[in-house]
């Protein structure tokens, strides 16, 4: 057995909660063709001509609301996860890199090579596969490995939406926040419909069959919407919830294209109209807290819920460096390394 190394990969974050730093981050993020998959001239026109002129000024103050003493929450929690794994697993080097921003994927790979790693696991921190997250991260890591001329024995962790090592710590993190009159909302990061439709090679299932994401079949083995539903059903079963005690929605939309439905904002209004007064929200697509959970959900969605007549809202924190999750993630890592041929 050679020396093992793991690169944890997350989406990214600005270096500072300033308009300039947010603009730099969004430019790299939104110009990625795996994120906005329209012809390059239109993508550059949309991002450079419209989005980068408007959104940085709106988003920078939001980052300022959640910024921690140590820096960006996403970076802080990613660092804590990495350090916790490093303390737990012997003979394995851990680094983390951001697909966009710092620390970069390249810097993480260079540290692992310098540490003498010859068996490398690329681990995108996304339980559910999507072109805009998992695929883009792995593609970029391979590009950097080629540029470095480094050829370690290579493994990838693609998605783990129903692995007990993930769903049990997730369910256990939710349980303390539930009472008989609490409704549980699973709020996942949104994705354009075009991204999930292209996964269906048959062109006969996605968005054409009723409740397509709930039906397990060959056409949606790599479908983000199906993966989100699979996680939801696994956790619901572990919590013993009835059908009327939970809902699913998608948040964080950007741009005019069609996105997975229902949106979290619309679902919140619908739940209040149904008479739901006590709500708990969990965001299973995010393994570390960041802007989408600490600001979008815990501030923005909270205000929406209360404005429409809701009484009590709990936003359940991400798994972050929860010991049970770290143990589970460590087990997934060991399991993946054991799949290497002897």
Image (tube, rainbow, N blue to C red):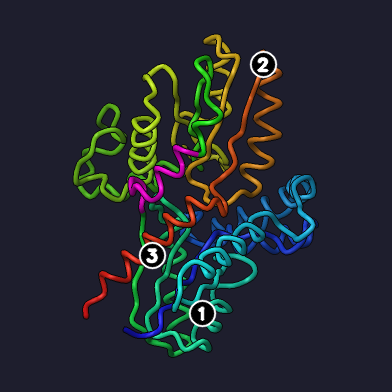
Q: What crowding class fits label 3: few (fewer than 14 Cα within 10 Å), some (14-19), or many (20 or more)?
A: some
Q: Residue at x 27, y 27 (%)?
A: 210
- Quote the CA–CA distance across marks 3 and 2: 41 Å
Asked if residue 276 lies left or right of residue 291, the reply is left
Depth check, front residue: 300 or 245: 245
94 w.r.t. 153: above or below: above
Query: In terms of sequence position, does the residue under pointer 3 or pointer 1 come before the other?
Result: 1
- Quote the CA–CA distance across marks 1 and 2: 48 Å
Image quarter of the C terminus = bottom left
Q: What crowding class fits label 2: few (fewer than 14 Cα within 10 Å), some (14-19), or many (20 or more)?
A: some
The residue where tag 1 is placed is: 109
Task: State the mark number for residue 311.
Answer: 2
Q: Residue at x 42, y 76 (%)?
A: 142
Q: Residue at x 56, y 29 (%)?
A: 177
Q: Main secondary structure of the magenta part?
A: helix
x%, y% of residue 108?
A: 55, 76
Task: State the mark number for residue 333.
Answer: 3
- Assign a secondary structure to mark 3: helix
1 w.r.t. 294: above or below: below
191 w.r.t. 6: above or below: above
**Image depth: mark 3 or mark 2 in front:** 3
x%, y% of residue 311?
A: 67, 16
- Assign a secondary structure to mark 1: helix
The answer to whether marks 3 and 1 mark residues whose Cβ atoms lie closer than 8 Å is no
- Assign a secondary structure to mark 2: loop
Query: In terms of sequence position, does the residue under pointer 1 or pointer 2 come before the other?
Result: 1
Q: Residue at x 45, y 74 (%)?
A: 90
Depth check, front residue: 340 or 42: 340
- Give the residues drawn in magenta, as a range: 160-172
Asked if residue 331 lies left or right of residue 275, the reply is left
Q: What crowding class fits label 1: few (fewer than 14 Cα within 10 Å), some (14-19), or many (20 or more)?
A: many
């Amino acid at each position: 057995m050679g020396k093992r190394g793991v690169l944890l990969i997350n989406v990214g974050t600005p270096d500072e909660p300033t308009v300039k730093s947010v603009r730099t981050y969004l430019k790299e993020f939104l110009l990625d063709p795996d994120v906005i998959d329209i012809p390059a001239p239109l993508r550059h026109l949309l991002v450079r001509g419209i989005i980068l002129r408007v959104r940085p000024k709106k988003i920078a103050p939001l980052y300022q609301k959640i910024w921690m003493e140590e820096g960006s929450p996403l970076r802080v929690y990613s660092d804590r996860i990495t350090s916790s794994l490093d303390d737990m697993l012997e003979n394995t080097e851990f680094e983390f890199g951001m697909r966009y921003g710092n620390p970069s994927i390249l810097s993480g790979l260079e540290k692992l090579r310098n540490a003498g790693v010859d068996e490398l696991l690329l681990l995108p921190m996304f339980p559910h596969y999507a072109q805009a997250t998992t695929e883009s991260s792995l593609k970029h890591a391979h590009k950097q490995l080629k540029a470095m001329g480094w050829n370690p024995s290579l493994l990838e962790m693609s998605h783990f939406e129903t692995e007990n090592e993930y769903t049990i710590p997730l369910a256990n993190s939710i349980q303390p926040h539930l009472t008989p009159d609490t409704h549980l909302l699973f709020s996942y990061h949104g994705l354009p419909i075009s991204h999930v439709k292209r996964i269906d090679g048959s062109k006969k299932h996605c968005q054409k069959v009723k409740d397509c994401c709930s039906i397990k079949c060959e056409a949606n083995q790599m479908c983000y919407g199906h993966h989100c539903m699979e996680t939801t059903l696994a956790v619901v079963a572990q919590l013993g919830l009835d059908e009327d005690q939970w809902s699913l929605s998608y948040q964080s939309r950007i741009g005019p294209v069609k996105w997975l439905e229902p949106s979290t904002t619309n679902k919140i209004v619908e739940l209040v109209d149904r008479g739901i007064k006590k709500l708990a929200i969990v965001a299973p697509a995010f393994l570390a807290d960041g802007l989408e959970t600490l600001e979008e959900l815990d501030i923005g969605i909270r205000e929406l819920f209360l404005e429409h007549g809701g009484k009590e809202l709990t936003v359940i924190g991400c798994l972050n460096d929860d010991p049970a999750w770290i143990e589970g993630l460590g087990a997934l890592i060991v399991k993946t390394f054991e799949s290497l041929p002897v």
